[in-house]
Image: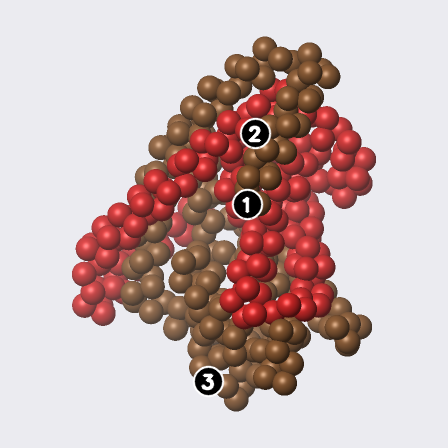
Amino acid sequence: MIDYIVPLLLLVTCALALRKRENAYDLLLSGARDGLELLISIVPTLILLLTSVTMLRASGAIDLISNVLQPVMAFFGIPPETALLVLIRPISGSAALAVGAELMTIHGVDSLVGRTVAVMLGSTETTFYTISVYFGAAGIKKTRYTIPAALIADFTGFFVASLTVRLLYPT
Amino acid sequence: MVMSWIYTVILGLSVISAILLGNSSDLAAAVPKGAQAGITLAVSMAGSICLWTGVGKLMEKIGLTQKLSILLRPLLHRLFPSAKTDTPLRASLCANICANFLGLGNAATPMGIQAAKRLIRPDKPGIATDELCRLIVLNTASIQLIPASVAAVRTSLGCQTPFDILPAVWITSLCSAGLGVAAAWLLGKVWRHD
């Protein structure tokens, strides 16, 4: 079932575009060109952040952080290896991507940790960045309970990601 | 500025722990290795990223967001009562949520900001209203149909089935958005005065 979602999405979007007499192929091409630009714009970030995260791993600091947070994370059933990702995810999207890619490389993409990392990345957002963009644009000074509520959502995401991966993909 | 801090703190932690744990040679070797990993990741993600931005453009052009918004209306009216009477607000809210759902981040943000501006109460400038808080919580808890960039990372690392995480991603997003909105609703009852 899952195998059909992506191919069907590709087909259905093209078919709908043709029905609307849009030039589907040209749109796909120009979109892909935008994607290339987007990619070029994040390459420097990825290089810097993967350098720093690889250093953090080699120095032994990542294991230290995981060990310190281990009791809390184990209590909620979140793999302690994901400690750094959990800390950095709400702050920076590109740093989270770098940390996540490094974790998937070290532990294996299809391992429990690798899958949990992927689900965490796919189901959460860069909370603080989003909050600052919206409140900045709307001129809001008093944010009231937005930050606690958003962090509850993030935490739920980390918790449920670990739970669903453990239940759906037993290793 | 935030990134400068994050980067410096990460480097500082690395150097201090390397000294304390005696991992100095590993630390030095990690520098070129990490830089190379950055470009390798970018290149091996390139194909999927470009394909998905292409599909994203197509979805935007054929008005998939408008189609989705009809399905969304009942839920929208519960979360944002002002949208019942305010048509432009309803349109930008729908466009924001649907664009997020389809993974069109670039289209979602301007729409969300438009909606946010309409949710401010003129008599209380600078203070977030309950509905505005809910909108932002919805935006910070991403609900995405196809998490394309994560799938791209997985593919780049040799995963044969990059999309097999979809059910887990959907369940997780729904739970986190649901609980986030519920928390906002509860906190809104308590947090009457700023």
In the drawing, does residue B13 fall left or right of residue A2? Answer: right
Q: Is residue A56 above or below residue B100?
A: above
Specify the quadrant that holds the C terminus of chain A: top right
Q: Residue at x 55, y 15 (%)?
A: B28
Image disc number at residue B1: 1
Tag 1: residue type?
Met
* Front one among A54 and A135: A135
The answer to whether residue A87 is visible is: yes
In the image, farthest residue toward the bottom:
B85
Q: CA separation, marks 3 and 2?
A: 47 Å
* Pointer 2 chain: A
Q: How many marks?
A: 3
Crowding at mark 2 (Cα within 10 Å: few <14, some 14-19, many 20+): many
Q: Colour of chain B?
A: brown
Q: Which residue is mark 3?
A: B87
Please provide percent x and percent y for residue B138. 58, 64
Q: Is residue A81 above or below residue A130?
A: above
Tag 2: residue type?
Val
Work out whether disc 2 and disc 1 sit on a shared chain. Answer: no
Q: Colour of chain A?
A: red
Q: Which residue is mark 2?
A: A53
Please provide percent x and percent y for residue B99. 43, 63
Which of the two labelled residues, at mark 1 and mark 3, occupies the earlier sequence position? 1
Please provide percent x and percent y for residue B114. 47, 73
Mark 1: secondary structure: loop
Query: Would you say the residues marked 3 and 2 are in contact, meaning their CB atoms lie under 8 Å apart?
Result: no
